[in-house]
Amino acid sequence: MGKYLDNPASLKIDLMLRGIRMEDPVVKAWACGSSGVDILLPQDTLVNIPCRESFTKGSPYLIKRRGERYFITDGKSEVPVKLVQRPAFYGKTTSTGVPFSDIATVHGSYTVVTPSKRCDFFNRSIECKYCAGNFNVEGASDRVFSVDEVVETAEAVLKEGASKIIYLSIGFSPGDDGGIEFLRPYITAIKKNFNCLVAVEALPPKQNRWIDETYALGADSVLYNLEIFDKELFEIICPGRAAQIGRKRYLEALEYAARIFPNGTVASHLIVGLEPPGSTCMGIDCLTEMGVVPVLPIYRPSSEKDLSISPLTTEIIIPVYKHLYKAVTKRKVNLNWVRDISMVTTPAEIRGLVDESKGGLMESFYKSRLGMKTAWGLSSLRRKLRVVDKDPDGSEH
Amino acid sequence: MAVEIDTRPIWLILALRALRPVFFAVLGLVFIFVVQMPTPDGLTQAGQNAIAVFLLCLVLWITNAVPLAITSLFAIVLVPMLGILSNKDTYALFGNEAVFFILGAFILAGAVMHSGLSNRIALGIMQRYGGSPKKLLLSIFLLAAVLSFFMSEHAVAAMLFPIVLEISKALGLKPGSSNYGKLIFFSLAWGCVIGGVATFLGGARVPLAIGILKETTGDTIGFLEYTVAVMPLVIIMLFVGYFLLTRFYPIDITGVESAHEIIAKRIKGLGKVSFSEYAVGFVLALTIAAWMFMGRQLGLAAIALSSVVVLFVFRLVRWKDIEEYVNWGIILMYGGAIILGTALDKSGAAKWIVSESVGQWAGSPWAVFAIFSLLAILMTEAMSNAAVIAVLLPVSIGLAQSLSMDPTLVTFAIAVPAGLAFMFPMSTPANAIAVSSNYVTVRDMTKGGIIMCVVAWAVFNLVAAFWWPLIGMGY
């Protein structure tokens, strides 16, 4: 078998790094308009494989169809895979006529919902250098989706069972709250209408009280994405984040959030490929020490700009992922929350690179329907116990 | 929503949360036990039930496990349910004159505040008399006290707080370290507390006490009679308060020009005196005069409600303007307290409690007066002053009757000290407001409060011993 084909975890990393070529018209149609194609590798390992960027043309991998079955081959050997069904709701619209696919994107166990495509870093020309422009104000013409539109989208996602977690994501907006005031009505409405888990990706607020508010509102998980751990590279590649928030505040906010949110539900992206592996490993140690789950997406260079370190190969980055797995298990960070995400290789998936075990009973349980309901129930109970209203019903003296 | 996240271990939070249902379950069991236990000699079943309700309310009022008003509603439900009083009698007690007097006083105070008159008077006095640090301090102290003669002390503290806070900022006083900062906020709190006991209007506790007195004995206390009896205490405590404050915290600033600018700016912002300010002021003055000179004939509540009607007839105020000033919770609480007090009296429970407990060691009127005033002044530091009255007054009236002592005296012994809360922020909202400024710490308040508490109790007893006989009262 090929170099990485025999191990789904390493194959996922290699596929994300090198992309895939396509011949089959069905797969091509799937990938049309998407950032990549969602494939289910052996051992239910979900991956979103780049297929449109120019670097994918040189990929050794090809996805091919034989009868009703799909295979990924590197020219020497092949593994059977499954093409993830495109969610049916992608083809539908809200009652206001907005395509659901404009508002939400399924990434495996969670669906990213972006109520606003704004990121004020673009307005100030201090956007992150790697950003593909998802939040580009020019491209998105300031469209803010209403609470009703987002609720309709969440309903469509959950009804279809496309994923079980609604992941609300916003860009930078001026203010001390990191965007939580903006997200408040969305979180409240989703929590009011559905028994689902909600994750929030926002910018670290200036005061910790906003983190308390985020948890109290109903967010079950929070992500403040540092993206780059190296101080100097962070300032160069993420000038907006460095100037408006600062690396120190990122780390402070993550540390505080890890004390407020349940174990394993506070995460931060560290992009692999934008800084030396050693630096990423230091970031992993720093974050896991705080109880934060480092999530390691792989940098996808665009045709216009390539910021990646050189050489960037699977051989170089696999040790980083192994280090991640060892760090999270050493610090006893719960891995049940950040898992089954197509865009990143999660610590739970890396287990296959480090040992042969397939995860415990608990992991299987939390993947089940009953497990998700249990997670939701426990998360709600924990919130009920931990959140204290500071304006209780007072009585006149 | 202002929230806080409890980061203690979940097991500990669960255990603490479980305490509440356990607390109520235990309370319920104790209540049932007291109701079901064999009736002691000298006590009727109704009396025993009344004691059970009293104990239940006592625990709930002290712990504040549910809002005070809800405890009162619970008492209203239990009294007829346990056959202590009939349904008709129980709910009729809610129509007590004291309850309607309190309602009228709330509406009048609301009208005065809404018109802006109280604010204008406060600012005017500060501008007129606050020419130096000492004079400004004195004007805040006396203003808080004198305004509390006519309005709820809580309302006065809330009204003056933003003005005093702005003055402290204009003077550049540093929270925590500035003596003058401490002085002006202590003046605000203590002025309100001392002034609040001068008349029926400083707080609703005196009308509550009189309501219980009237329901249990048929006696009452007149507006003027009360003020004349208490005024020496108020004057002496104002002197003592000012003396103590300026000794504890010597004035550490030399001028107050910047404060004057702020006051002048605020006065300018008020514009000229409006017709409604004149008219509301006139109605209030007339009402106070009627309370003083015709209170006994017409009834305090009738006067208060007549004034309210006048305010609305002449459209000096709209209902939605004063709605926020009417504390319905406290009205419910007082109604329930009166019902509970009457239940204890009519069932004979109050007399039985006295004969079995306090009566053993409070053998003389003097001792009764001293002990109950001490209990009241200590209890009010930790619990609602209205709850102090609801808990102590029915028992003390029973004791007074058994000693052939005038029940109005024990009403004074409890109603007046119940308003003298100096020690802690939770003792009264005026103290809480002072501490919330960050100029006065809890430690400062406790230190000064202990001395004020002891002095107030001693002065009150001395006034009762030496002043009251001169005006035809006394034990």
Image (cartoon, helix red, strand yellow):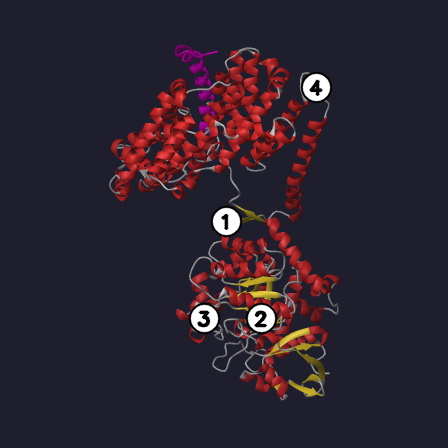
Residue on which disc 3 sits? A143
Query: Mark 2 belongs to which subunit?
Result: A
Residue on which disc 2 sits? A277
Q: Are marks 1 and 3 in contact (CB under 8 Å)?
A: no
Residue on which disc 4 sits? B40
* Residue B100 quadrant: top left
Label 2 and label 3: CA atoms lie apart by 38 Å
Whether labels 2 and 1 belong to a single chain: the reply is no
Q: Amino acid at mark 2?
A: Pro
Label 1 and label 3: CA atoms lie apart by 30 Å
Query: Mark 3 belongs to which subunit?
Result: A
Answer few, some or many: residues within 10 Å of disc 3's Cα (few below 14, many 20 plus, some between 14 and 19): few
Mark in the foreground, 2 or 1: 1
Residue on which disc 1 sits? B2
Camera-nearest residue between B340 and A239: B340
Mark in the foreground, 2 or 4: 4
